[in-house]
């Protein structure tokens, strides 16, 4: 459970806030002493701290500053019954997540805590990914698609197999190539990237294989080629679909036996390099059109890895956004920004035609133009417009009554969404008799039932169900997993 610590020298505030948050399934601890609060934070894994500005034995702002020195510090929400603008400014400067005025409004309190918990979750997720996946060279994401790519990379990297990375422009094909190199036995040798589309066709042979002095006008010195620079390591031929046929023939020769000829040279040279290639083009079609050599295609396509566009893994958008905002803010010497729920929900609906590169550029725009919180008003107009879009009806349901879901809902243990019996879950709610369960158990049962029937009505499409329910896709995923984890022998349903 999420752990919340309330630090306030007023006993009534501690009791009231504790009751409100406990009713929302948070694990709440309270204290009226600042020093004791610091000890609890040091000894326990606290996620969010609700902290009074004026404590009896110390300043809440001093306590805030002390807590924020820990790199794994919890999110902190400041409270004050005598709020001054300077206090709010100082609290924000010291790293407070939010500032609430007393008397506390229940809905405002719960909203602030929910947002702080969400930010804490994302921060820890980002840190976990950065710590455990540093070897994957920034391939951030925990979606099934990204997990599949990381598995493929970990399998192919230790081998000598050539890899062809496929995907649209901006999806991060170069990160996959760097990860393969970093996890290979060539990691300590050179990784050389070649952008085949950026080198003029008349110069690409010289760039790839080098030239001898005097071999052509302007060749005043001997020059090493990129293959020679990568000797013993890895060469990454990005956008190889744009390479000329003449250069393709030379690359094929290197792949066959490691031989190449410098421009103007009279003898062959030899290299030992691992070749990784990438393209955003359909090479099979290019082969059919005669613009790409079939023999080279088969030489390169030993292990294909397809990188999906961002629109196919929108569940990774919150993580990517937080990583980019943190990195870019550091580069600009600014404090990291937060993205409010509505803005993040809209980002998670957007198709991102420019893929990861577009999201990164958007985050840089936020860092430059926004102050503290990114709101829907800060988003481009085409993303803002998604807020007013209604979900597209499922054509398979048009003109027909939606089939009734067949799902079991016992009173205490909630089953996974994949189970089914002959009972309507909503009907089961009506059949519940007083005294058979607690209010909390009934509330969980009702929430689970409504999620189930909505998912079934939307054809098990989580994104569309989230729109209909008015919640973020990531939150809906968490709720589904929560209910499934309570079921005996529940399987992970990635619907």
Image: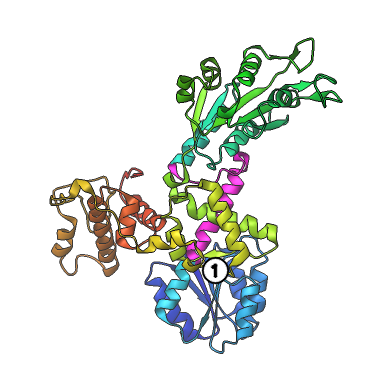
Q: Residue furthest bottom?
A: 82
Q: Residue 153 colored magenta? A: no
Q: Residue at x 69, y 32 (%)?
A: 191
Between residue 422 and residue 332, name the one nearer to us.
332
At which x and y percent is residue 231? 73, 23
Under tag 1, what secondary structure? strand
Quadrant (top left, top right, bottom left, bottom right) of the C terminus: top left
Q: Residue 128 colored magenta? A: yes
At which x and y percent is residue 196? 63, 30
Q: Is residue 53 left or right of residue 12?
A: right
**Above or below: residue 345 compared with residue 294:** below
Q: Main secondary structure of the magenta part?
A: helix
Residue at image mark 1: 373
**Above or below: residue 12 compared with residue 399:** below
Q: Is residue 278 left or right of residue 272?
A: left
Q: Residue at x 75, y 11 (%)?
A: 268
Q: Count the marks.
A: 1
**Above or below: residue 284 compared with residue 46:** above
Q: Residues within 10 Å of mark 1 (few under 14, many from 20)?
A: some
Q: Quadrant of residue 272?
A: top right
Span of residues in magenta: 116-144
Q: Residue furthest front?
A: 217
Between residue 451 and residue 15, name the one nearer to us.
451
């Amino acid at each position: 459970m999420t752990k919340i610590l309330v630090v306030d020298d007023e006993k009534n505030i501690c009791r009231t806030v504790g009751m409100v948050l406990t009713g929302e399934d948070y694990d709440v601890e309270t204290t009226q002493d600042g020093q004791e609060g610091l000890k609890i934070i040091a000894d326990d894994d606290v996620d969010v701290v609700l902290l009074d500005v004026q404590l009896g034995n110390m300043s809440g702002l001093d306590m805030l500053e002390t807590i924020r020195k820990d790199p794994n510090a919890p999110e902190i929400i400041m409270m004050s019954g005598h709020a001054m603008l300077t206090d709010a400014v100082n609290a924000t400067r010291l790293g407070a997540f939010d500032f609430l005025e007393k008397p506390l409004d229940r809905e405002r309190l719960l909203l602030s805590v929910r947002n702080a918990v969400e930010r804490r979750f994302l921060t820890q997720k980002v840190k976990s990914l950065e710590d455990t996946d540093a070897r994957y060279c920034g391939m951030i994401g925990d979606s099934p698609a990204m997990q599949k790519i990381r598995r493929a990379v970990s399998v192919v990297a230790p081998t000598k197999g050539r890899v062809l990375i496929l995907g649209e422009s901006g999806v991060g094909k170069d990160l996959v190539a760097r990860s393969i190199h970093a996890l290979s036995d060539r990691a300590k040798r050179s990784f050389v990237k070649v952008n085949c589309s950026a080198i003029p066709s008349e110069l690409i042979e010289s760039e790839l294989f080098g030239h001898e002095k005097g071999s052509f006008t302007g060749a005043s010195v001997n020059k090493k080629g990129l293959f020679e620079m990568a000797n013993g390591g890895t060469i990454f031929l990005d956008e190889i679909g744009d390479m000329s046929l003449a250069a393709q023939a030379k690359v094929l020769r290197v792949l066959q036996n490691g031989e190449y000829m410098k421009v103007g040279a009279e003898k062959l040279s030899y290299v030992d390099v691992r070749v990784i290639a990438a393209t955003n083009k359909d090479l099979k079609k290019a082969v059919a059109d005669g613009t790409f050599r079939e023999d080279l295609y088969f030489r390169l396509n030993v292990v294909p890895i397809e990188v999906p566009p961002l629109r196919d893994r929108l569940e990774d958008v919150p993580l990517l956004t937080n990583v980019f905002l943190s990195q870019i803010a550091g580069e600009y010497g600014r404090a990291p920004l937060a993205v409010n729920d509505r803005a993040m929900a809209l980002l998670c609906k957007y198709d991102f035609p420019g893929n990861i590169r577009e999201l990164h550029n958007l985050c840089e725009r936020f860092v430059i133009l926004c102050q503290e919180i990114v709101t829907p008003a800060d988003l481009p107009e085409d993303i803002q417009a998604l807020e007013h879009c209604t979900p597209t009806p499922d054509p398979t349901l048009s003109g027909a009554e939606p089939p009734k879901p067949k799902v079991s809902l016992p009173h205490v243990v909630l089953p996974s969404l994949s189970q089914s019996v002959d009972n309507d879950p909503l009907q089961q709610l009506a059949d519940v008799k007083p005294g058979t369960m607690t209010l909390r158990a009934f509330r969980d049962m009702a929430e689970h039932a409504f999620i189930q029937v909505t998912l079934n009505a939307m054809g098990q499409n989580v994104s569309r169900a989230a729109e209909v329910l008015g919640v973020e896709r990531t939150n809906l995923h968490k709720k589904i997993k929560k209910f499934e984890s309570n079921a005996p022998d529940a399987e992970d349903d990635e619907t």
